[in-house]
Image: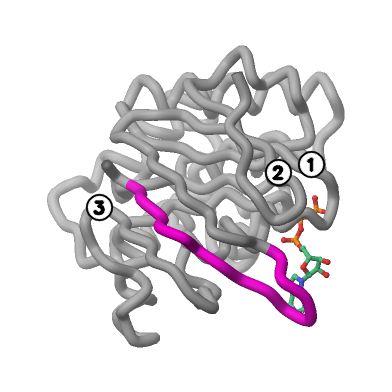
């Protein structure tokens, strides 16, 4: 398993996530649905090591996230997680190419100098390599962000409402492209969305409801 959680619990003023048990295998694409405020982003942030659980365990690629200190969790996140945000979160002062080189530099990954260009070509944005993010449309920025999440071949890609800022037509194209690239590269993805129709495009779907993770048929 690439991702395992055991009896994971998290609350703020009130209990939010209760006894979350989840298993995701290498290469699986998983959809997480749930009403606004049900805790979807909180669960993703726990899996990314950006929040710590109140109790329970999280293992990513066999590494026990729950028992790591802050520095270890940051290293783990950089190396093993690719994150796709609703608002793209590209670094505005770096070119598209430089944005894609950053995960490689942070992880000291060498010998893959062509990889940013190969990924940009796959998403139809090779000509945009030297442009600044602000000069790209929202859909184009999200295609770059998908490349950034894939570039260091992380164990797990987490996407939090990746099409939430896009119009319907662009959203559809971007999400299709994200699934296509993730599957072509054999990557593992967990995507949060409000779009129930995505259930037909994934391997497993869950709904967060009343603090519990309910598998959908
Ligand atoms: N750091 C925090 N401190 C206090 N409360 C928080 C914190 N983070 C999240 N919450 C609360 O936890 C609940 C769940 O938030 P979360 O963002 O995980 O929901 P969500 O399912 O992703 O919602 P949406 O679909 O609207 O993005 C909300 O009531 C939110 O206010």
Quarter occupied by the C terminus: top right
Q: CA distance from mark 2 to mark 3?
A: 24 Å
Q: Is disc 1 in contact with disc 2, using a CB cutoff of under 8 Å?
A: yes
Q: Which residue is mark 3?
A: 61
Residue 151's quadrant in the figure? top left
Q: Position of residue 179 (x, y in %)?
A: 51, 24
Q: CA distance from mark 1 to mark 2?
A: 5 Å
> Which numbered disc flags the more N-terminal residue, 1 or 3?
3
**Crowd tier of the residue under label 3, counting other residues whose Cα lies within 10 Å: few below 14, some 14–19, many 20 or above:** some
Q: CA distance from mark 1 to mark 3?
A: 29 Å
Point out which mark residue 164 bears. 1
Query: Disc 2, ligand 1: is the CB inside 8 Å?
Result: yes
Q: Nearer the viewer, mark 2 or mark 3?
A: 3
Q: Position of residue 120 (x, y in %)?
A: 45, 33
Q: Which residues are magenta?
A: 3-16
Residue 217 seen anywhere in this rendered image of the structure? yes
**Crowd tier of the residue under label 1, counting other residues whose Cα lies within 10 Å: few below 14, some 14–19, many 20 or above:** some
Residue 199's quadrant in the figure? top right
């Amino acid at each position: 398993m690439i991702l395992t959680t055991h009896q994971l619990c998290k609350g703020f003023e009130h209990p939010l996530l209760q006894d979350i048990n989840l298993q995701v295998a290498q290469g699986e694409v998983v959809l997480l649905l749930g009403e606004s405020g049900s805790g979807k982003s909180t669960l993703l942030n726990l899996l990314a090591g950006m929040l710590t659980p109140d109790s329970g365990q999280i293992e990513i690629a066999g590494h026990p996230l729950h028992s790591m200190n802050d520095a270890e969790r940051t290293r783990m996140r950089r190396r093993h997680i690719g994150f796709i945000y609703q608002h793209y979160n590209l670094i505005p002062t770096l070119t598209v190419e430089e944005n894609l080189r950053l995960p490689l530099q942070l992880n000291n990954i060498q010998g893959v100098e062509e990889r940013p260009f190969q990924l940009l070509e796959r998403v139809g944005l090779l000509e945009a390599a030297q442009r600044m993010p602000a000069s790209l449309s929202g859909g184009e920025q999200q295609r770059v962000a998908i490349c950034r999440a894939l570039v260091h071949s992380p164990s797990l890609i987490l996407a939090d409402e990746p099409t939430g800022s896009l119009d319907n037509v662009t959203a559809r194209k971007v999400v299709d492209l994200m699934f296509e690239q993730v599957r072509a590269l054999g990557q593992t993805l967990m995507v949060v969305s409000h779009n129930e129709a995505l259930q037909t495009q994934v391997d497993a779907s869950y709904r967060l409801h009343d603090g519990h993770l309910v598998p959908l048929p």
